[in-house]
Amino acid sequence: MLRIAKVGSLCLLVSLLGVGCSDDDSASGAGGSAGSSTAGSAGIGGEGGSAGSSAGTGGASGAAGSGGTETGGTAGQATADLQSLIETAQTEIGLPALAGVVLRSGGIVDQGVSGVRRLSQPDLATLDDHWHIGSNVKAMTATLCAMLVEDGKLEFDAKLSDLFPEVTGIDLGLADVTLEMLLQHRAGIAAYTSRLSINVIPTDVADDRQKFAEWLIQQPPATPIGEFNYSNAGYGLVGAILERASGMTYEELLDSRLVQPLGMQSKAWLSWPASTEAEQPWAHWSITGPLQEHPPTDVSMPLGLSTAGNFSFSLLDYARFVQLHLRARREDPELLSQGSFDKLHTPNGDYAMGWVVASYNGKPLLAHEGSLDGFDAHTVIWPTEDLALVLVNNAGANFASEPVAMRWLAWSELPWPAAK
């Protein structure tokens, strides 16, 4: 059976994913050691139980997806209908909104969305809305690193002392830490996932990627180097390294190497969607009691940490990135060589570079969860099934993570449409 465990107050799907991949401001600050990456039979029915108190959205439905009209799986077998599943799950869990896509290596084969952008407003969420994807950004950051390695501008075994030669006060314990160790959360860098720990960062460096990186590498290691410790700060440091190596801002690099080549229709937005455009989904949060709207400007992750998980994408655009990695696992790589994708997907323990590597019911998978304050996003790739699923919602992980995860575990066994 799937076990839900806690590291601090961070909800982990330990048996399945092995590590905590959330950025919630309720988290304790440091992730724990990675656990087993293999889950046994979960014994999950079609729908899991509800979590938290009902948001009272009434199951309002936005623009429907394809509705599973194609035939896939066993000949003559009816395919699943993601729109119907999402409408039911959104209402039963009590989420303001829930949206999702099902992918094959050839593209999206089903999609759905249900609910409202804000609990206090009637505007329906849409698939074209931007959704905060949290720590799913880590896979993008790692992919950009692999691109610069192929360009000859970076090396995975490059040491911090070589990457920041002008920083004379670098901690001796961190001097030999490599880019690869940072990407695998084995650099000894503190997590900086809670508001309390983030408030320790000096205000004059928190919102400057380069200043933050230079400050961070002068701090002593928080955990033994080489030991797994999930760290947003480590990926914030990687963002600064990417800027140095490319001569571009992270946003410019992301746009030129991923957004445009993948044909995304809109740019990545820093922070929550409604901080860029008013008519977008709002975050919602609850420690106890009903969900409450979370103001778009009250985001706990400063710019120095943003490359770990503080960007928003339209769901259909983000799906293009997920498809990139699904195709690579089926030996049909784009934008990078097969060898580079294999490097990104090969775990040290249970964690690779921006991906948890695990299995469920005997099926290998790549997965990650991203959650910041009041959004939650789940990405799962089953390479042998030529299948990927992305689910996003605008409620905090302590409210949404477990029941949403129980759904995608159950839905992974359904007959989805074949590739178009």
Image (spheres, rainbow, N blue to C red):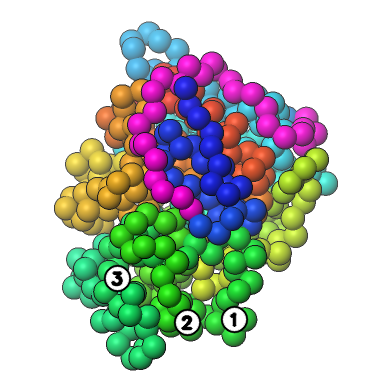
Within-10-Å neighbours for mark 3: few <14, some 14–19, many 20+: many
**Which corner quadrant of the image does residue 200 belong to?**
bottom right
Q: Position of residue 3 (x, y in %)?
A: 50, 30
Q: Main secondary structure of the magenta part?
A: loop
Within-10-Å neighbours for mark 2: few <14, some 14–19, many 20+: some
- Could you tell me which residue is drawn at 31 percent across and 27 percent down? 363
Work out whether residue 313 can be spotted. Answer: no
Q: Determine the residue located farthest toward the front in the rendered image.
A: 224
Residue type marked 3: Val
**From the image, which quarter does the C terminus lie in?**
top left
Residue 44 highlighted magenta (yes or no): yes
Which span of residues is magenta-colored?
31-58
Counting the numbered discs, the total is 3
- Residue 215 numbered mark, or none: 2
- Could you tell me which residue is drawn at 31 percent across and 24 percent down? 362
- Residue 177 numbered mark, or none: 3
Q: Which residue is mark 1?
A: 202
Asked whether, in this view, residue 131 is left or right of residue 90, the answer is left
SS category of the residue bearing label 3: loop
Within-10-Å neighbours for mark 1: few <14, some 14–19, many 20+: few
Q: Are marks 1 and 2 in contact (CB under 8 Å)?
A: yes
SS category of the residue bearing label 1: loop
